[in-house]
Image (cartoon, rainbow, N blue to C red):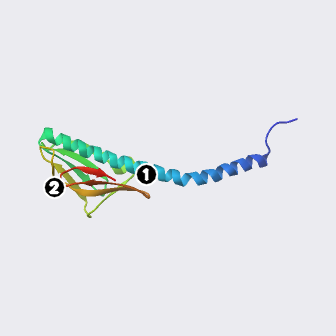
Amino acid sequence: MRHGYTLFELLTVLLVMAVLLAIAVPPAAHWRDAAAVRGARDELAGRLAWTRIAATSHGGAALVLDIPAAAYRIELGDGVTAHRGDLGRGYGVVIETSASRDSLVLRYDALGVGRTTGGTLQVRRGRAAAGLTVSPYGRYRRW
């Protein structure tokens, strides 16, 4: 007696697996988008905190956000660019602000107090979105 599976049985198993995969793919894509959005927002929040700390030792600092490119750079008070980041390329996200502008400068003085900061940033990818609200004094809140 031979042991094995018939072609019909193998095709039935493949069909069931294909149906299960088709059901699972859309939620997985949304989870991937949500993770990318949260990661980009958290990187931006971390760099904002780093900018505030660096401002106290360098006589001021600013995080300059290029909205269309979803990129940022940190400029220290002594004119040195300390760090560059590209959220668009790294996470595949776009950034939107509460006001339509091409760039946003979040500046801190030598005491680490925000000067001319403030604004709402929304990070998007697909249907997933997350945000960061920066107060005029430079504190931020994630949402």
Who's the residue at 60% across and 54% down the image? 22
Q: Earlier in the sequence, mark 2 or mark 1?
A: 1
Q: Quadrant of residue 76?
A: top left
The residue tagged with tag 2: helix, strand or loop?
A: loop
The one nearer the camera, 106 or 142, is 142
Residue 62: give x, y in percent of width and height. 18, 48
Mark 1 surroundings within 10 Å by alpha-carbon count, few (fewer than 14), some (14 through 19), many (20 or more): some
Question: Tag on residue 19?
Answer: none
Q: Which quarter shows the N terminus? A: top right
**Tag 2: Cα neighbours inside 10 Å, few (<14), some, or many (≥20)?**
some
Rendered location of residue 72, percent (x, y):
27, 49
At a point 68% along the width and 50% down the height, the residue shown is: 16
The answer to whether 4 appears left or right of 101 in the picture is right
Q: Tell which of 70 and 43 is nearer to you.
A: 43
Q: Amino acid at mark 1?
A: Ala
The label shown at residue 116 is 2
Q: Which mark is residue 34?
A: 1
Q: Position of residue 51 (x, y in %)?
A: 21, 44
Residue 114 placed where, x, y %?
16, 50
Residue at horizontal 73%, vertical 50%?
A: 12
Q: Mark 2 and mark 1: span between their CA atoms?
A: 30 Å
Callout 1: helix, strand or loop? helix
